[in-house]
Amino acid sequence: MNRYLLWASCALSFVLLTWGTNTLSALSLVQTNGEPLDGYTLFAPLQLTSTYLIDLNGQVVHQWNSDYTPGNAVYLLEDGTLLRTGSVSLGINSTFTAGGAGGQVQILSWNSDILWNFQYSSDQHLQHHDATMLPNGNVLFIAWELRTREAAIAAGRDPALLAEGALWPDHLLEVKPMGLGNGQIVWEWHVWDHLIQDFDPAKANYGSVAEHPQRVDLNYVQGRAGADWNHTNSVAYNASLDQILLSVHNFNEIWVIDHGTTTDEAAGSSGGRYGRGGDLLYRWGNPQTYRAGSRADQQLFGQHDAQWIAQGLPGAGNILLFNNGMGRPQGAYSTVEEIVPPLDEQGRYTLASGSAYDPSAPVWTYAAEAPMEFYSQNISGVQRLPNGNTLICSGAQGWFFEITEDKQVVWEFLSPFAGPGRGQRAGSNDVFKVRRYAPDYPGLAGMLAED
């Protein structure tokens, strides 16, 4: 059935909602057609300073208030606190101005009290996009760092690819919370430590890109060569493997690195749990980046929210992501992809010399029946649910929907701040990603009864 006709057939009702300090009359649409997973959906509109938890009827059952818009991610933790990034860069940080700019990570109580706040914003670095809580209680997040034009050229960057003068390669920080406004950086990893280039033999990092798929080609660019070179937009952690998964938007790839390293080992190519230091253990989505394929072999297009499916869930151990479809040769439409990484019993990824990493295709894909009806050119997210369904956030429209394994829509919600149509960019309705929490989730224990 045509998705627009489905929505047109749903009853629209005016609902009065309290969002932050403003009470707004807004259009909200909820459609249930089957058996969605019972629970509550968490989201934070990027233009607002509040975070919301809604039930399956679209009713706000709880909200957290902040002084900052998201920068960009929010998660409900198992102890009932909220891990929330915040955008402090507007008017403060004039160096890093790309989408996803944040600058701080906070932990908020159920009542929105700030329990921990860590700012990471200067003219040399800025937190952006995503963060995750590690099992040890530390917080892992993505950040940009400034590399000058001179430093980039010395490292082997083609000067013609420096239109904006400088580069902002990404890095990761693991921070141990140390009181309200303090944190100790206990581990870090930098893209800049793992470069390869074949542009200038007189410069650093010179070598064969094709022979070093574990390294990052300093001169790889697809499209515009801006300062925001990598634009990593999600970070996830696998405790059993002690590995980190990154979604690297501007490379149209996902990367996996070893977390079982010291910071010194993470800067090199040896040591750690897998013996390769901080070099890439795995990459997938665009083999052009390491000269193992052509444009025809590219499978990811501006993807977001890459994650391992958790143990105990259908597809456990597979990688799930939202494939935005920006620049897709077949046309601008989004899909959700699930892949089976080529992992051996030791947690290593197999690769035949001179070839691209497997798999050759996803094991499961969702696209709309009329593909062009489902398209979010930026942000967006996905989550595998305990009942085997998949929750999808088409972020540019604030449109959330849950589908079964056989791709039937059983629940959908259009945020009250949606624009005039789901196929259009809504602007004020952007949502980075969503997460569904079952009623027995530990972080909800005894909480909703107190509202």
Image (cartoon, rainbow, N blue to C red):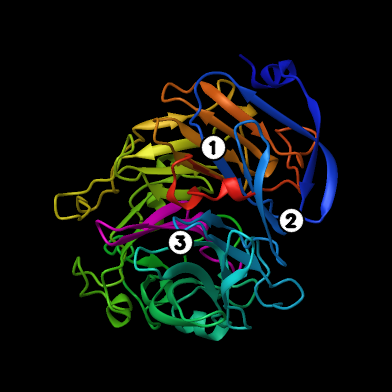
What SS does tag 3 mark?
Answer: strand
**The residue positioned farthest toward the left in the image shown:** 345
Which residue is denoted by mark 3 in the rendering? 132
Front-lying residue, 224 or 18: 18
Residue 131: image location, x then y, percent: 49, 63
Q: CA distance from mark 1 to mark 2?
A: 21 Å
Residue 1 falls left or right of residue 348: right
Which residue is denoted by mark 2 in the rendering? 48
Q: Are marks 3 and 1 in contact (CB under 8 Å)?
A: no
Q: Residues within 10 Å of mark 1 (few under 14, many from 20)?
A: many
Q: CA distance from mark 3 to mark 1?
A: 19 Å
Identify which amino acid the numbered label 2 is placed on.
Answer: Leu
Q: Earlier in the sequence, mark 3 or mark 2?
A: 2
Residue 86 figure quarter: bottom right
Residue 155 falls left or right of residue 369: left
Magenta region: which residues?
Answer: 226-255
Going 33% across and 38% down the picture, which residue do you hit? 313
Q: Is residue 224 among what the camera can see?
A: yes
Q: Nearer the viewer, mark 1 or mark 2?
A: 2
Residue 113: image location, x then y, percent: 63, 68
Which residue is denoted by mark 1 in the rendering? 392
